[in-house]
Image (spheres, rainbow, N blue to C red):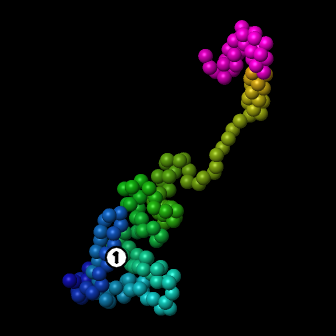
Amino acid sequence: MKCTHCHENEANTHITKVINGKREEMHLCSECAEKLGVMDEFNFEPFSMDSFFGNLLGAGASALNSLTGIERCGYCGSSFNDIINTGRVGCANCYDKFEDKLSPSIEKLHGRTKHVGKSVTYTEEAEEAKAEEISEEAKLKEELKKAVQEQRFEDAAVIRDKINALNGEA
């Protein structure tokens, strides 16, 4: 099989990547693999468990992306097309990687691209009125309790209606 990069030499390095169920295969000759830096990921000198697992899990990702011509997040491997198709950003680093493409959509949805927090607007008068309403309700509840204890049920019914009116109930 010929090298998929130079189309001249016999391929001796075979790379398969599967992202979101989509499988892509590349067949490279040793010169192209070295030129693209694919084999650099497999150098285990000096040997340590950290470098072994790091190289094993992320082997050749940057080279694969450069071969396919698709810009991908270096952390999670998501492309901008993946984000469009799923409607979800792969990781926090994708926001930095695809900032120029994501910013217009984010601004259109949220009005701005920077989070400024929740803005609460209220006036002192509104707070005082609310506190007064609560104290009025508490006062009426005490009167209701006293009227029931004294078995003045007609008065209790009137007080109950006042409390419901304060709470906006019919």
Q: Residues within 10 Å of mark 1 (few under 14, many from 20)?
A: few
Q: In the figure, residue 29 lies in which quadrant?
A: bottom left
User: Residue 33, percent across and down?
Assistant: 34, 85
Residue nearer the viewer, 149 or 36? 149
Residue type indicated by callout 1: Leu
| Residue farthest along the bottom direction in this orientation | 46
- Residue at which label 1 appears: 67
Q: In the figure, residue 156 lies in which quadrant?
A: top right
Q: Does residue 28 lie above or below 123 as drawn?
A: below
User: Residue 129, percent across and down?
Assistant: 75, 27
> Where are the magenta residues, as a range?
142-170
Which residue is at 23% across, 87% downward?
10
Q: Does residue 157 lie above or below 46 as drawn?
A: above
Element carrying mark 1? helix
90 to the left or right of 36: right
Which residue is at 51% across, 82% downward?
50
Residue nearer the viewer, 147 or 94? 147
Of the 4 image quadrants, the one containing the N terminus is bottom left
Tell me, yes or no, whether the highlighted magenta stretch contains residue 150.
yes
Q: Does residue 2 lie above or below 22 as drawn?
A: below
| Residue farthest along the top direction in this orientation | 154
Of the 4 image quadrants, the one containing the C terminus is top right
Q: In this orientation, does residue 169 appear?
A: yes
Tell me, yes or no, whether the highlighted magenta stretch contains residue 45.
no
Residue nearer the viewer, 155 or 40? 155
